[in-house]
Amino acid sequence: MKIKVAELTELTLKALKYYCYTEEESKTISDVLLYAQLRGNNQGVVKLIGKGIPRNPAAKPVSIVKETKLSAVLDGGQNMGMVALKQAMAMAIAKAKEHGFGMVGTHNTSSSTGALGYWAHQIAKEGFIGFVFAGSPETVCFHGSFEPIFGTNPLAIGMPSENEPLVLDMATAAMAYYGLIEAKTAGHKIPPDIAYDSEGNLTDDPAKAMDGALRPFDKSYKGASLSLMVEILTGPLVGAAFAGIGERNNWGNLIIAIDPELLADKEQFKKNVSALMARVKQTKKLPGVSEIVLPSERGNKLTKEHLASGEIEIEDNLYNELTKVAGS
């Protein structure tokens, strides 16, 4: 069904109020969720249904565990992942503005940090190169195995340009975990070759996949190895759980901001990034290809269309479930 973007925003804020978040926390989380929803990304409002993302009543303020002029590690205090990562991003950007480089890790959060492209986009809008990595509990197997050992381990990279930032946002798994929830909620099947059930058989049933394991995004050792590296950056490096070792509710993240001025003239760098993007768009197309699409381009276009029309398409069951939470 189609609904007003304003209505979706209101439902999102009401749901977050139901989950006991403060007004400031709700604004942060809503911004991230709606960024994803407007782009057609499955890291959107689906996070608010089912078990949802209730605020931990025992959460403590995010605190600094270790800090240097270039880096920091934050204890998330069992706060919502997006709330902790907002503080980490602000610190990384501040350090990059002062020293050209900022790297901040977080641990001790117990929920998703949302679409990582949101954070990489924010960093790139400030004129910095952004890297963002996220860890989570075991849902993805290593190549050659069907035992879940890694999280979906997404990563995002943001590059400033003369216009909109160029942002790569991808899970190293064949599907984000919330993609399974979305498919299950809608009663849809998933592609037949991206997940195993608990016995190691390929399945197109999202519920069986949730009891089993997702495969790496390319179903090969390359994707599995990339997932392994993200696991290291968001587990051992930042003091969070990894591969089933440590407390399950101790999720980790790493965020990096780099000033291009360390290596190049910043404005020329932006021009060159824009020139590179234009050059890629102009490359010769294969038969049947109408347009060369760059990372984040499809999402940017969808967002503009939704905001211009003031309406967005949302799956009926998802809308109904979200309305129930918001009405509570």
Image: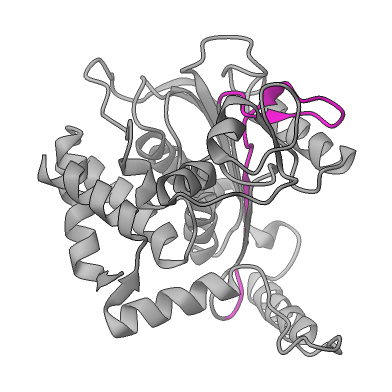
Q: Who's the residue at 70% across and 56% down the image?
A: 262
Quarter of the image for the N terminus: give it: bottom left
Q: Does the magenta stretch mainly form a helix, a strand or a loop?
A: loop
Q: Nearer the viewer, residue 7 or 79?
A: 7
Would residue 154 appear left or right of 288 to someone viewing this image? Answer: left
Q: Is residue 112 left or right of residue 157?
A: left
Q: Position of residue 193 (x, y in %)?
A: 75, 46
Q: Nearer the viewer, residue 149 or 22?
A: 149
Q: Which residues are magenta?
A: 137-162
Q: Which quadrant, please, contains the C terminus?
A: top left
Please say which color scheme the image uses: one colour
- Work out whether 81 lies above or below 300: above
Q: Residue 283 lies in what quarter of the image? A: bottom right
Q: Height in image: 213 above or below 322? A: above
Seen from the viewer's position, the closer of residues 54 and 23 is: 54
Which residue is found at the position 72% from the left and 90% from the top? Answer: 290
Residue 135, image x, y percentages? 59, 31
Query: Taking the image as drawn, is residue 31 in sight?
Result: no
Which quadrant holds residue 309? bottom left
In the rendered image, residue 156 lying in the magenta stretch gets the answer yes
Residue 139 shown in magenta: yes
Q: Position of residue 134 (x, y in %)?
A: 58, 36
Say if 291 sits above or below 199 in the image.
below
Q: Nearer the viewer, residue 235 or 225?
A: 225
On the rendered structure, is 203 left or right of 73? right
Q: Residue at x 83, y 35 (%)?
A: 225
Residue 224: % across, % down: 80, 36
At 61% from the left and 49% from the top, the residue drawn is 190
Residue 108 makes an appearance in the image: yes
